[in-house]
Image: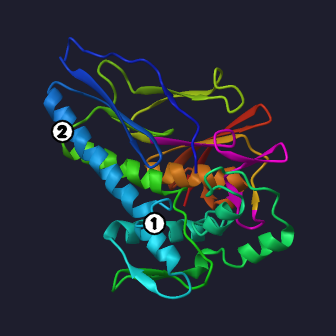
């Protein structure tokens, strides 16, 4: 998943009533910019907490990245069809989450999409395939795609891929998982007012001083100078999946990086999907899932279960909807 940028509207940088000061820092991790804005009267405490959160995002990137040949995911992929691989608690937990979401969404969210990402040119340096993959080539790759190819040995803490050519890509879930971990660290270190922005996947802890929450804007997928959606977040996460930020161009046509694993084709009908949820993990997964298949891919209930707010933009039409997932 690659998110549209999210704009945090200006907030108070210093509160005379509470004497809380604002610290805003940015680092580069997981191939993008990650920022944290936090308030506290003790600036040293804020910097200490942010350092720990940034250390965590870098540590998890080293475990999950398909671009790092030494990551645990790359080791699993390299052993596909041959053997499983001993993994960390975090990798075990994240892939277990991914399998659970695959079952919940009837396979529309599937972390074994990596062979299709390679086929469509999203893993070569230029990201420019020379041609549209023929149907027979897509079908051959699809044979190695499917979450049923993942083998998990919880007792020995090992993960493998049962089919040669299968490969895992955690791009639609790893950012959400990581943002939640960063938020937990900030809270544990005594930060009660902070905003995490990981390339558009955001989490709001509490609110800025003298405000009811963190005001945010999702730019239009067509014109970033225009707003598609504006809201206020407090102890909530938001993720936006878009078709305009990451793509390959083939014969003058753009193809989105979010691929439908049932057809092997990039998704084309939706411009952007924003999901607001209690956790960044949920927001990340479901913004990707709904981008592929819309909310019909998910079993829902009325006024019961976990609440998701969905903002879907398609052909200059914005649809807002509230869902309760089982």
Q: Residue 70 colored magenta?
A: no
Image location (x, y in percent) of residue 280: 45, 48
Which residue is more in the foreground, 39 or 165?
Answer: 165
Q: Secondary structure at mark 2?
A: helix
Q: Is residue 196 visible?
A: no
Residue at the disc numbered 1 = 69
Q: Residue at x 85, y 69 (%)?
A: 135
Name the disc covering residue 48, or none: 2
Image location (x, y in percent) of residue 66: 50, 62
- Which residues are drawn in magenta? 237-264
Outermost residue toward the bottom in this view: 82
Indicate the quadrant where residue 36 lies: top left
In this view, 78 is above or below 237: below
Asked if residue 183 lies left or right of residue 276, the reply is left
Image location (x, y in percent) of residue 44: 14, 31
| Camera-nearest label, 1 or 2 | 1
The CA span between labels 1 and 2 is 31 Å
Q: Secondary structure at mark 1?
A: loop
Q: Residue at x 72, y 56 (%)?
A: 293
Which residue is more in the foreground, 9 or 137?
Answer: 137
Image location (x, y in percent) of residue 145: 66, 74
Which residue is more in the foreground, 313 or 36?
Answer: 36
């Amino acid at each position: 998943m690659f998110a549209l940028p999210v704009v945090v509207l200006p907030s108070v940088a210093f509160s005379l009533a509470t004497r809380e000061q604002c610290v805003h820092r940015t680092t580069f991790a997981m191939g993008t910019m990650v920022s944290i804005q936090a308030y506290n009267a003790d600036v040293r405490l804020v910097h200490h907490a942010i350092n720990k959160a940034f250390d965590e995002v870098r540590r998890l990137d080293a475990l999950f990245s398909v671009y790092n040949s030494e990551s645990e995911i790359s080791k699993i992929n390299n052993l596909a069809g041959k053997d499983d691989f001993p993994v960390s608690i975090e990798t075990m937990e994240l892939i277990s989450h991914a399998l659970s979401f695959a079952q919940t969404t009837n396979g529309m969210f599937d972390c074994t999409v990596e062979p299709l990402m390679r086929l469509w040119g999203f893993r070569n340096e230029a990201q420019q395939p020379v041609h549209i993959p023929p149907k027979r080539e897509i079908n051959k790759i699809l044979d190695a795609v499917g979450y049923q190819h993942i083998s998990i040995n919880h007792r020995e803490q090992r993960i493998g891929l049962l089919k040669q050519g299968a490969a895992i890509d955690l791009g639609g879930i790893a950012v959400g998982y990581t943002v939640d971990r960063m938020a937990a660290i900030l809270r544990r270190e005594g930060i009660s007012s902070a905003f995490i922005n990981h390339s558009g996947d955001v989490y709001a802890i509490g609110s800025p001083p003298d405000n009811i929450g963190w005001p945010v804007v999702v730019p239009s997928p067509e014109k970033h100078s225009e707003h598609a959606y504006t809201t206020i977040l407090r102890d909530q996460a938001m993720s936006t999946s878009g078709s305009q930020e990451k793509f390959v161009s083939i014969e003058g046509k753009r193809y989105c990086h979010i691929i439908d694993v049932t057809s092997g084709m990039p998704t084309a009908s939706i411009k952007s999907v924003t999901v607001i949820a209690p956790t960044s993990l949920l927001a990340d997964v479901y913004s990707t899932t709904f981008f592929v298949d819309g909310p019909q891919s998910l079993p829902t209930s009325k006024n019961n279960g976990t609440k998701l707010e969905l903002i879907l933009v398609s052909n200059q039409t914005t649809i807002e909807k509230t869902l309760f997932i089982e």
